[in-house]
Amino acid sequence: MSVSKAIMVVMTTSRAVTRRHLPSSPFSAPVARQVEVFAVNDRVTHDRYGLGSVVGIEQEVAVLVDFGIQRVRITTPYTKLNKL
């Protein structure tokens, strides 16, 4: 009798890699998101903290937002912060 051996191969997933855009590609290049500009007293909403008001600005670095219970410094890019 012959005994066959089973070989188990473990497959790993590839890591997420940002693909580079080639100038000669027929597909459009990814669009860079513009950094939103806030002013003092702007009403804003945040995905985690809720409704708030801008009380301070660090030019192109961060904004200080008063959410009623707490004040939070939010740095750029403001992905979760939206102006109302």
Image (cartoon, rainbow, N blue to C red):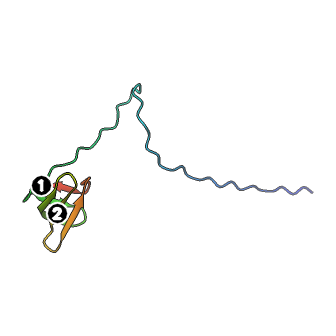
- The residue type indicated by label 1 comes to Leu
Q: Circle 2 — which element?
A: strand
Give 3 or 67, whichever is nearer the viewer: 67
Q: Quadrant of the N terminus?
A: bottom right
Side of 29 relative to 2 (left or right)? left
- The residue type indicated by label 2 comes to Leu
Q: How many marks?
A: 2
Residue that numbered label 1 is attached to:
84
Based on the displayed image, in which of its 4 quarters is residue 52 positioned? bottom left
Give 50 or 63, whichever is nearer the viewer: 63
Based on the displayed image, in which of its 4 quarters is residue 33 positioned? top left
Residue at the far bottom in the pictured view: 69
Q: Circle 1 — which element?
A: loop
Q: Is residue 7 above or below residue 23?
A: below
Side of 53 relative to 12 (left or right)? left
Q: CA distance from mark 2 to mark 1?
A: 16 Å
Residue that numbered label 2 is attached to:
64
Residue 8 place in picture, x, y as percent: 71, 56
